[in-house]
Every structure is written in C-alpha cells, then in structure tokens.
Amino acid sequence: MNILVINSGSSSLKYQLFKMPSKSPVCSGLAERIGIDGSFIKHTVYNKEDKHIIEQTSFISNHGEGLKQILKLLTQGEFAVITSPEDVAAVGHRVVHGGENFSGATIITDDVKQQIKKLFSLAPLHNPINYKCIEVAEETFPGAKQIAVFDTAFHQSLPEEAYRYAIPEWYYKEHGIRVYGFHGTSHKYVSEQAITYLKKQESKIISIHLGNGCSISAIKNGKCIDTSMGFGPLSGLMMGTRSGDIDPSVVFHLMEHAGYTLDQLSTLLNKQSGLLGVGGSSDMRDIRKLLGEDDDAAKLALDLYAYRIKKFIGTYAAVLNGIDAIIFTAGVGENDSAMRQAVCKNLNYLGISMDDDKNLKYKGEILAVNELDSQVKILVIPTNEEYEISSQCFELLKV
Ligand SMILES: Nc1ncnc2c1ncn2[C@@H]1O[C@H](COP(=O)(O)OP(=O)(O)O)[C@@H](O)[C@H]1O
Ligand SMILES: CC(=O)OP(=O)(O)O
Ligand SMILES: [Mg+2]
C-alpha cells in the first residue's frame, strides 16, 4: 500500500512516499527556506542499491506552491515514482493543531476540515498551511484517503495539573483554554526509539525537539506528562521566529503605551522574534555564520536559546523526579553539535555529562553522546515524523 506523507512545518515542507509496511521510503525530500531567500527542494529517489538526487533552487513563496513543485517531481520525468494518482492509497498529513477532539489518526472529512479551519487563529503559522496542503492533495489524488495526524495527539495524556492554566474554569469549559502541546508526533517517535534503545519501558525521558519551532516534553513510561508549548505553538523555548515564553504584561504594555494592535502583536511574537528577532536570522546556520564573524547579536541569540532549554531541563527533572535520558532531535537538535554542548554544559549536578568527542561524531543514526559514567544518557535521535504518520495511517486503514 503506497502512502504519501506531507509534513508541512513553518519553514519547510517534508515528504516521503512509503510502500507500507516497509520503513524504507520509495522517495523522500524537503523544500526548505520557504518564503525566505535561498529556497530549495531536495528530492531523493531510492532504487535498490542506488539513489538519485534532484535539487531545484528557485524561490518558493509559499507551501502550496512548494507542494505543487514536489508533486511534479513525484509524477513526471525520468525518476517519477507515481505513474497514476490511483497508485497512492492514502495521503497522510501532519496537522499541527487538533484541539481536544483528536487523539489519533483521523480520516479527513468536510467536518474535520472545518475543525482544522476553526483552529487557524491558534496556530497561525501552521494550520492554514496544513489546510492548503490537504486541498492540493485532494485535487491531485482524488481517489486517495486523506488522513490527518495531529501534533497535539500525543499530549492528550497530560494530567490536569499540567494542562490547566491558573485562570477560572469557565475559560477552559467555554473557550477550551488549556495546554495542548505540539510536535507530538516527533516526541512520540523519538521517545519510543529511546525506550527501545534503553531497553527500559519504565523510563523518565526529556525529549528536546529543536526545529524552526522548538519544544521540550517530559515523558514518563512512554506517556507525555508535560510539554513546553501550550494553547498554541508559541510558548516555552525560544524558536526560529517565535519568542517562546514571555510575560503577558509585555502584551498589555505594548497595547496600552505603544498602540499595538492584535495583528501587530501576533506578528511580533510569531514572526519577528526568536533567533530572527534577537540574532538577525531565523535559520540556525545563518546564526552560526554570523557568530563566526564575531556578531554580538548572534552570540546573544545563541546564549538565550541554550539558556531557555537548560531551564526547562531543570524543570522537567523535577516534574519527572529524575531523568534516564535526554533526547536531542529535529533540524537544530540533530545537526548543531555546538548547541547540544552548550545546553549540556554545567548540568553535572543532574547527572548529565557529555562526551564532547562523541557529540561531534553524530552522523544521522541514533547515538549516545554522554560520558560512560554519566547517570543520564544523552541521545541524538533523528526524528521521522513522516514514518510515524505513515504507520499510523497504515494501522487506521488496516482495521
Ligand atoms: N547543519 C545544520 N546546522 C545547524 N542548524 C541546522 C543545520 N541544518 C538544519 N539546521 C536548522 O534546523 C532548523 C530547521 O529544522 P526543521 O526540523 O527542519 O524545522 P521545521 O520542521 O520546523 O521546519 C533551521 O533553523 C536550520 O537552520
Ligand atoms: C508546531 C511547530 O512549531 O512546528 P514547526 O516546528 O514545524 O514549525
Ligand atoms: Mg518540523
């Protein structure tokens, strides 16, 4: 059964085509730096021993356009992997915000689409894009099942003390104001990988997802018990363009004393803050380049970014009453060894000590980068949201 998975993030669009139940994809790829300079698509087709890579470097203004270019690569030319739309049984979509209604993979109906639409304002960088990708896929593969896998699903296990805010209950009951949490598909996938690696079902794990969006989760015995993103994917860690935690008084102040509108505030906190706002670019690779040129703003951005992660590790060590392993994953977590090192520095009191040489050796496979006598394992685990989505779709269709 062929399942195409579309994982649209805030800055990227990743995809993989699986012939389920095989975990090895038929093809995979990503469009990166969507909407900023230097956009590109890297498309890889896997043959038995060989692989073919196609790279395109024209500007991609938005995700809908990116997906159309990707679908061309899948269906046209010498390395096409889909000869007819009927070849695809299902398209699995990452959908970021599912509110409280979805805890598993869900067939997309008109009603589900309306619910995704209702949540646009809570995940403005994501749900509109996810919705657009669903529409493009419906047009391209009219006979395929369209299935949504929500980032919020894995966090439905949060206990009430973690998911409720300290405001009157009415706001929860009437307006659904609570912590939902995001990147759940990634946290679920990497924590399951860690449990298998540790051979320890009863485990206390901190999973740190550092992509364009960033979040950190406390996972006890395979269940998420707390997470840093909240009502929307804006709180917690510092991100590519998002501020992460900020005192709400700042919002009142800017409204009252600087005449900011809601739109301006949303733009400031969602699109102009984080690495971009402090360091001058949303892309960690650019920040590293600026650091190499002794740029003070880039240095400050890196310090803030690492400090915030460290603070959350301390918080979740308390929440979990100990730690067996911490996981670094996603674009920055997997590729930026210097950030992993900065985060783990001076955490010896928690039993976390990194082997700096091993940390430099990560090559894309799960790797423990802690010293041998470190009480806590430090794992770098490549996330695979696409495979996790594909297997959830496959399970749903098998029933
Ligand atoms: N080699 C690298 N070194 C440092 N950062 C990297 C590297 N490769 C990718 N990244 C960073 O990963 C981030 C994107 O992560 P990703 O998980 O793909 O994001 P998303 O899925 O949220 O779009 C970008 O900030 C990018 O700079
Ligand atoms: C939820 C979220 O922030 O996703 P991304 O990292 O893909 O932007
Ligand atoms: Mg992502």
Image: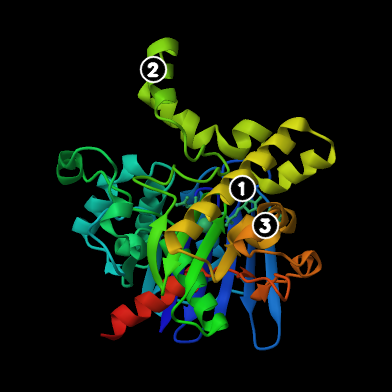
* Residue sticking out furthest to the right: 293
**Quadrant, the N terminus:** bottom left
Residue 176: percent from the left, percent from the top?
Answer: 22, 46
- The answer for how far apart the CA atoms under marks 2 and 3 are is 38 Å
- Kind of residue at disc 2: Met
Q: Secondary structure at mark 1?
A: loop
Task: Kindly identify which residue carries mark 1.
Answer: 33
Q: Residues within 10 Å of mark 3 (few under 14, many from 20)?
A: many
- The answer for how far apart the CA atoms under marks 1 and 3 are is 28 Å
Q: Nearer the viewer, mark 2 or mark 3?
A: 3
Indicate the quadrant where residue 85 lies: bottom left
x 57%, y 74%: residue: 27
**Dots 1, 3 in contact, CB < 8 A:** no
- Kind of residue at disc 1: Arg
Upstream in sequence: badge 2 or badge 1: 1
Of residues 325 and 93, which is closer to you in this image? 325
Task: Kindly identify which residue carries mark 2.
Answer: 255
x 47%, y 65%: residue: 187
- Kind of residue at disc 3: Cys
Ligand 1, what quadrant? Answer: bottom right
Q: Nearer the viewer, mark 2 or mark 1?
A: 2
Task: Kindly identify which residue carries mark 3.
Answer: 344
Upstream in sequence: badge 1 or badge 3: 1
Q: Is 32 situated above or below 300?
A: below
Q: Secondary structure at mark 2?
A: helix
Residue 15: percent from the left, percent from the top?
Answer: 52, 66
Residue 111: percent from the left, percent from the top?
Answer: 19, 57
Q: Residues within 10 Å of mark 1 (few under 14, many from 20)?
A: many
- The answer for how far apart the CA atoms under marks 2 and 1 are is 32 Å
Of residues 191 and 385, which is closer to you in this image? 191
Q: Is 214 situated above or below 275?
A: below
Q: Residues within 10 Å of mark 2 (few under 14, many from 20)?
A: some
